[in-house]
Image (cartoon, rainbow, N blue to C red):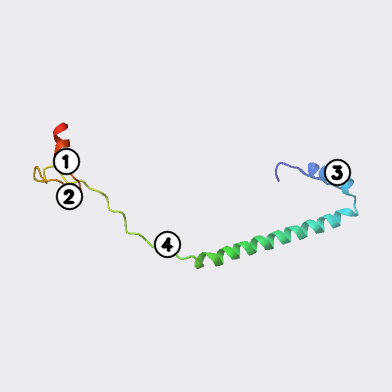
Amino acid sequence: MAGLGWTEILIILAVVMLLFGSAKLPQLARSLGKSARILKAETKGLREDDDEAKPAQPAPPQQPPAQQYAPPPQGQLPSGEPIQGVPVDPNQARNR
């Protein structure tokens, strides 16, 4: 129990009895029990709310896997023919 022996627990209980008194301890334990019960009920309510909310959310549409770009193999295009969609400036090619 967290490294506490019976002697240490009895000493702690004696100190608590001296601090709060024997008349105040039952009231203190009762309020602690009520607080724990309220906390337990609230966490249970939150879990139930989460369970109800999960099916209500629509699943995102599945997208087909992205197609990978594969450059055309070298030598496939006839020489001097531009690639579709890429403008070619003859002056720019000569300057290089």
Q: Is residue 54 left or right of residue 42?
A: left
Neighbor class of circle 1 (other Cα within 10 Å; few <14, some 14-19, many 20+) is few
Tell me the tag on residue 15.
3
User: Mark 3 or mark 2, which is nearer to you?
Assistant: 2
Neighbor class of circle 2 (other Cα within 10 Å; few <14, some 14-19, many 20+) is few
Residue 92 sits in quarter: top left
| Number of marks | 4
Q: Secondary structure at mark 3?
A: helix
Q: Residue at x 81, y 56 (%)?
A: 29
Q: Secondary structure at mark 2?
A: loop
Q: Is residue 94 left or right of residue 7?
A: left
Amino acid residing under circle 4: Pro
User: Mark 3 or mark 1, which is nearer to you?
Assistant: 1
Q: Residue at x 59, y 65 (%)?
A: 49
Q: CA distance from mark 1 to mark 2?
A: 14 Å
- Residue at which label 1 appears: 89
Q: Secondary structure at mark 4?
A: loop
Q: CA distance from mark 3 to mark 1?
A: 92 Å
Q: Secondary structure at mark 1?
A: loop
User: Mark 4 or mark 2, which is nearer to you?
Assistant: 2
- Residue at which label 2 appears: 84
In the image shown, does 20 or 93 lie closer to the viewer?
Answer: 93
- Residue 44 in percent (x, y) is at 64, 63
